[in-house]
Amino acid sequence: MTTREEDEKWMRRCLQLALGGTEHAAPNPMVGAVIVHRGRIIGEGCHVRCGEGHAEVNALRAVKDVDRPLLRESTIYVSLEPCAHYGRTPPCARLIAEVGIGRVVVGCIDPFARVQGRGVAILREAGAEVVTGVLEAECRALNRRFFTVQERHRPFVTLKWARSADGFLDRRRTPDEAPARLSTPLSRLHAHRLRALHEAIAVGHTTLTADRPRLDVRHWDGPSPQRFVVGRPAPGELPEGFRAAESPEALLRLLQAEGVQTLLVEGGRRTLQSFLDAGLWDEAWEETATLVLGDGVAAPVVPPGVVRTALTRLGAAFTLYRNPRPAGLD
């Protein structure tokens, strides 16, 4: 008889494995799978890249021939409900049923409309014992971007800014003057890693005209995000490769229609504050520099009731804000 403590132990291993898809699994969720026979792992895997094998498939492939007769007496742990539909790959729930694994432990139910309990139903109909909700909060948090798209009908929104020690984004300056240097060469690596982990990036109209940002990932490995500006640029003012949306809501609707799951918003108090005030954000990274400006453009005001965590990344001080009540789109 497997205990809840044992189930949680192996589900934690699933969560570790799932991180192997951090860079390339999107737009699919990150998933880990572990096959256990009497306390011994006989196969494990993760979903590494969109279009390639799912975690369950890779875990089954990892089982040695000598251990394959043990599958019927084994438990497979999966951080997300096995899929039940034909996409780029066949449904994993049917594969698990076909090999005859007798017990399946699922971290959380897949909110995608073509799954959403159907994978569990297939397994139970095949005679498998199915346990759900093991480390459910942790499994949902791992794929919070995917869950936001499915449940709130908009991309997952991350805000990012750097402020001086006395709370300013920049000094007051003309477009010809250089902005205040608040980030360090090392902390810029963190900013570019965030860019690489998001499919789209946006700045406000003022930032676009004053700074002409490149918004690429030249300081990190990975694809550069699609570039957007929030506002109404004048004719000829929009640089090549940029697109414009009038408001945060308009931008999110555009991205949702195009299947974009993640948006990073950088720079500009007005643009950042518009996302904060509308509740259309999920996480925010605030870097606090040691530089004192004395006066300038004030940093955005984070609403009360958010979850705040102080962090150090690459020698820089950050506050990570999480929105406990993010707004969705109809």
Image: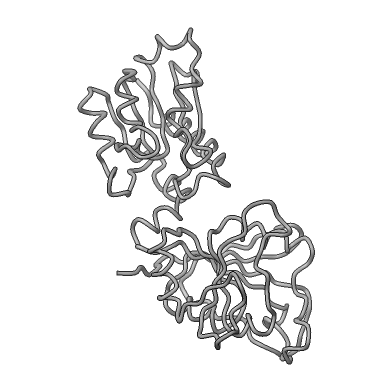
Residue 153 or residue 239, whichever sits in front: 239
Residue 288 or residue 59, whichever sits in front: 59
Residue 177 or residue 10, whichever sits in front: 177
Residue 69 or residue 10, whichever sits in front: 69
Q: Is 219 situated left or right of 58 in this image?
A: right
Instruction: Using the rendered view, name the quadrant where residue 129 is placed.
Output: top left
Q: Position of residue 293 (x, y in %)?
A: 76, 85
Image quadrant in which the C terminus is located: bottom left
Q: How is the image coloured?
A: one colour
Q: Is residue 48 above or below residue 329?
A: above
Q: Position of residue 111 (x, y in %)?
A: 32, 49
Q: Is residue 93 above or below residue 62?
A: below
The count of marks equals: 0
Residue at image coords 45%, 81%: 246
Instruction: Using the rendered view, name the quadrant where residue 17 is placed.
Output: top right
Q: Is residue 270 above or below residue 60?
A: below
Residue at image coords 46%, 39%: 51
Q: Is 262 situated left or right of 189 in this image?
A: left
Q: Position of residue 163 (x, y in %)?
A: 68, 77
Instruction: Using the rendered view, name the quadrant where residue 257 is placed.
Output: bottom left
Residue at image coords 66%, 63%: 216
